[in-house]
């Protein structure tokens, strides 16, 4: 049931060949993904890819504290693939690296003044700018670290992605001026109010908003003319596919296995409500050649489960505990890897696509 989830977008129909199986004209299609699939182990292939990857933060150098990560909150590549921007839990919060792993600049100290932050949660990256979000505030910097603009915001941001134009998309709960809970909004210039795209106030969404236990995952991804949003505040979790240029929803997939990382999830029975641990912690989304991909750490499994939404294909498992963060065709797939220390890895794009049984386009 999705009656409490409203999609605010023009009614113009967007036809995408890559989503022909997911829905065409009319209402968004729905599918229940993951059940009954075989699981294929790609640990060996991924280890080979990681062996040749550019690893950022992997080598702990006591003389360069900015290259040692405490906890990676978010990371994205610039669209041209030249830079990797990492958001860390400790200041300087934002670190900009060249694609060979060389640190270019680190900025945003802890504090409440201009160009500072106290608890940043997400970043968005364009070819020229970085959008930094924390509860109550949005800041835009150049890639060189110069503050461009700041404004107060009224929501709890958890994920950011590039939008269809020059805007950014921000995911996280907060009321609009009329008190309606908005989950996904579009940011243009900070002087303009953000535009609501996805609203929702189901019981599960209200509980998720109260917990605010939605950090540490990349729930938004941009690939070509598609936007992927894993809205796991719903019960069961839903993955929405939006199409440019007007953010029309063209597919809604249900992925029960990829629950949100809240402490418990209610299951109601005839005797009342009982609590169950979530079966998975969702950790990343990406779009590779219009193939929509989710990754999660599944309870009872060591490593990571990778699910392809577009293909009638098996799920994949790797012993590496990692998260999909970003992908730029012709350049790299950006992964967060937790062992031996938290770091990010730039893996060859085409090689990663082939490891999932796909053919690069």
Image (cartoon, helix red, strand yellow):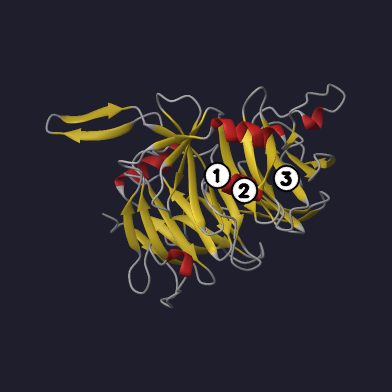
How far, Cα to Cα, is label 1 from label 3?
14 Å
Q: Residues within 10 Å of mark 3 (few under 14, many from 20)?
A: many
In the image, residue 112 sits, relative to residue 201, either above or below, namely above
Viewport quadrant of the N terminus: bottom left
Q: Which residue is mark 3?
A: 85
- Contact between labelled residues 1 and 2, with CB atoms less than 8 Å apart: yes
Q: Secondary structure at mark 1?
A: loop
In the picture, residue 36 is in which quadrant?
Answer: top left
Identify the residue under disc 2.
326
Q: Is residue 154 visible?
A: no
Residue 309 rendering spot, x and y as whole percentages: 42, 51
- From the top left corner, tell me how far across and down residue 337 is, in percent: 62, 32
Quarter containing the C terminus: bottom right
Mark 1 neighbour density, 10 Å: few (under 14) some (14–19) many (20 or more): many
Q: In front of the other: label 2 or label 1?
A: 2
Q: Which of the numbered marks, if any, corresponds to residue 218?
A: 1
From the viewer's perspective, is residue 1 above or below residue 262?
A: below
């Amino acid at each position: 049931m999705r009656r409490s989830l409203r999609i605010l977008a023009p009614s113009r129909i967007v036809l995408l060949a890559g989503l022909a199986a997911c829905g065409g004209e009319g209402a968004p299609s729905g599918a229940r993904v993951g059940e009954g699939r075989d699981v294929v182990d790609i640990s060996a292939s991924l280890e080979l890819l990681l062996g040749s990857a550019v690893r950022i933060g992997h080598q702990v150098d006591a003389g360069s504290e900015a290259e040692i990560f405490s906890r990676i909150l978010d990371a994205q590549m610039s669209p041209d693939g030249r830079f990797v921007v990492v958001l860390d839990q400790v200041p300087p919060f934002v670190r900009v690296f060249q694609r060979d792993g060389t640190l270019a600049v680190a900025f945003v100290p802890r504090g409440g003044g201009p160009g500072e932050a106290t608890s940043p949660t997400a970043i968005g990256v364009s070819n020229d700018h970085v959008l930094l979000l924390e509860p109550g505030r949005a800041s835009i910097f150049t890639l060189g670290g110069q503050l461009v603009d700041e404004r107060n915001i009224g929501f709890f941001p958890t994920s950011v992605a590039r939008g269809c134009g020059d805007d950014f998309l921000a995911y996280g709960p907060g009321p609009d001026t009329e008190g309606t809970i908005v989950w996904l909004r579009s940011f243009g210039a900070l002087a303009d109010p953000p535009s609501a795209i996805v609203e929702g106030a189901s019981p599960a969404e209200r509980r998720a908003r109260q917990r605010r236990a939605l950090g540490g995952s990349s729930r938004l991804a941009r690939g070509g003319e598609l936007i992927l949003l894993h809205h796991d505040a719903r019960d069961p979790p839903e993955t929405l596919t939006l199409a440019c240029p007007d953010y029309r929803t063209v597919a809604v997939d249900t992925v029960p296995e990829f629950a949100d990382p809240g402490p418990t999830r209610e299951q109601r029975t005839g005797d009342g409500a009982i609590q169950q641990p979530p079966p998975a912690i969702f950790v990343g989304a990406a779009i590779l050649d219009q193939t929509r991909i989710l990754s999660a750490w599944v309870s009872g499994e060591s490593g990571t489960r990778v699910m392809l939404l577009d293909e009638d294909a098996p799920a994949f498992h790797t012993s590496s505990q990692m998260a999909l963060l970003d992908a730029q065709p012709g350049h790299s797939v950006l992964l967060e890897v937790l062992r031996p220390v938290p770091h990010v890895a730039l893996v060859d794009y085409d090689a990663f696509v082939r490891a999932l049984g796909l053919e690069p386009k």
